[in-house]
Amino acid sequence: MKYAIFSLITSCLLIACGPQSESPGAAAQSGQSTDKTRADPYQPKPYIKINHPDWSRDAVLYQLNVRQFSEEGTFAAAQAELPRLKELGANILWLMPIHPIGEKNRKGSLGSYYSVKDYYGVNPEFGTLDDLKSFVDAAHALGMHVILDWVANHTAWDNALVTEHPDWYERDWKGDFRPTPWWDWSDIIDLDFSKPGVRKYMTEAMKYWVREAGIDGFRCDVAGYIPLDFWENARAELDAIKPVFMLAEFEERDVHARAFDATYAWSWSNSMQSIAKGTSDVGGLFGYYSGNESAWPQDAYRMTYTSNHDYNSWHGTDQELYGDMLPAAIVLAFVGEGMPLIYNGQEAGNPKRLEFFEKDAIVWQDHPNGALFKQLTGLRHGTKALWNGAAGARMVSVVNSEPQKVLSFVRFGEEDGVFAVINFTDAAQTISFPQALHHGDYTDYFAGDRVTFDGETTLALTPWEYRVYLKQ
C-alpha cells in the first residue's frame, strides 16, 4: 500500500463453471467406465499449484527504502551496504518503487514512490538503470535476491499512458479520471483492468525488469484491488523466464494457489500491537494461529512483521507501537510460523517516523536490535523446522499455567526443532506445563545452557522475557 495503512481486507472467490458432466447412467449406456475416465473426486489435491523458488524456503525479507537508506539516497550507496545486510541474515531484498515519480498533484516536494510516472524508467534520484543492474548483480554475487515494489493498480496523473491510452483508466461519476475510491490518494489515478491492453502492458513491463535487470520477483502494491486472474497469468509468464518470488499486499488465502508465494499477515501484526497496548492478551493470537493452521494451506507464506513503511511513517515507531515488548514480538515473528520481514532501520533502533514525501535519512548506529536480528536469522537459517511454509514444521501449542499471559509452543521437524516460551506481559511470571509434549533435552539458544524439561520443570520469566530452546 502507498502511505495509509491498508487495513480493509477484501476477498473475492471466482468460480468458473464448465459444462455439466455426463450423468453416470449416460456414461454406462455409452460403454464408458466412470471409474477409469475421470479422477477420483474425493482424492485431495494440492491447493498451491505454483512452485516456490528453492531460495525462498529459508529466506528472510528486508525492505529497503532507497531514498532514506543513506544520505546519498542512491543505488550505489545501498550497494555498499550489501555485505552488512548479508551479515544481518537478509536473503530477499525488497526495493520500494524505483520508478520516476509523477509531478502533477505531487505530495510533498519529492512525492510518493507509489505515484509511478514511467514503468520502464528509473528514478534519477536513485541513479541509472546501470546502477540498478550493478546493485542486483552485487546482491546475486552474495547469494541474495532482489524484488521490486510494483504498483499495478494506479499511475501518476502525468504518466504517458494518460494521453496515449486514456481509455485504460477508470472514471468517476463526472467522467473524470479518479484516484482509488475512498482513500486520500490524490496523486494517483486508477487503471481499468477490464481492458486487455492494460493487462498486457503491465505484464510486459514486469517481464522487462526480470529480463533487463535480473530482478527476482515483485512485491505487489494493493494486490487485492486487481483481479486475481491478472496476477495468475502474470505469474505464469514471469516463471517462464525464470523462477520468481511474488509477495502480495493482501491477506487472502486464494491468491496463493496460482499467483503469490507470500501475503501480508496483517491480523498477526494487529494482534501484536493490541497486546502491547494492553487491549488484548495472548488469547488474541490463538484465533490467528488457529485460522492459519485450519484455513490456510501450510505452504502459503504469510509475512510476519513488526514494522514496514506504512507502519513506521503513518502509525508509529517501534517504540511507539510496542514499547518494551518489541524484542518479544520480533522473536515470535522469526520463531513462529510465517516469513519474517525486517524494515530498514529497525536493526539500528531507528527512533523516528521516516518522512514519506521528503528526504529523511536513517541514522545508522549499533543497537541491540541488530544483534537480536542476527541471532534470529542465524537460528532460522540453521533450523529447518523454522523454514517457510511446508518446508518448516507446524506450531503446536504447549499448554501452560498462564495461557493468557505466556505463549508456549513447539515446532518439531524430522531433523530438528524448537520449544519457545514468551512472556507477553510487563509482570514476572512463573509457569508450569501440565502436559508432556515438550519433555526432553534442549540447549537454550540465547544463553547456551543445557536444559531438561520433564513433569516437574517450571519456568520463572521476567517481564517480556523470551526463551527459545533447541531440541537435541
Image: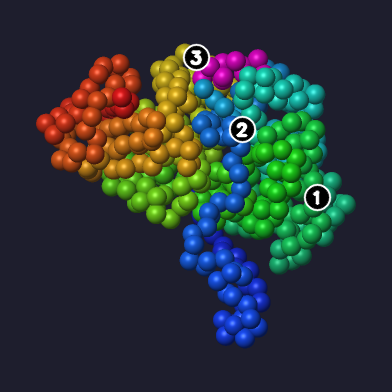
Quadrant location of the N terminus? top right
- The amino acid marked with disc number 3 is Gln
At numbered mark 2, what does the secondary structure look like: helix, strand or loop? strand
- Point out residue 214 in the picture as x, y percentages from the top left corner: 74, 31
Q: CA distance from mark 2 to mark 3?
A: 22 Å
Q: Which residue is mark 1?
A: 201
Magenta span: 78-88
Q: What secondary structure characterizes most of the magenta part?
A: helix
Q: Which numbered disc covers residue 112? A: none
Q: At numbered mark 1, what does the secondary structure look like: helix, strand or loop?
A: helix
* Crowdedness near tag 2: few (<14), some (14–19) or many (≥20) residues, C-alpha within 10 Å: many
Few, some or many C-alpha atoms within 10 Å of disc 1 (few <14, some 14-19, many ≥20)?
few
Vertical order, 451 against 40 (above or below): above
The residue sitting at 51% across, 31% down in the picture is 58
SS for dot 3: loop
Q: How many marks?
A: 3
Residue 207 drawn at (x, y percent):
77, 41
Q: What's the residue at 80%, 27% (across, down)? A: 129
Q: Amino acid at mark 1?
A: Tyr
Q: Earlier in the sequence, mark 3 or mark 1?
A: 1
Q: Label 3: which residue?
A: 365
Q: Is residue 104 left or right of residue 146?
A: right
Q: Does residue 55 appear to the left or right of 327 in the view shown?
A: right
What distance separates the C-alpha of mark 2 from that of mark 1? Answer: 23 Å
Task: Look at the numbered discs 2 and 3 and tell me whether their residues touch, using CB distance below 8 Å.
Answer: no
Q: Between 156 and 336, which is closer to the camera in this rendering?
A: 336
Disc nearer the start of the sequence (2/1): 2
Answer yes or no: is residue 294 visible.
Answer: yes
Q: Which residue is mark 2?
A: 94
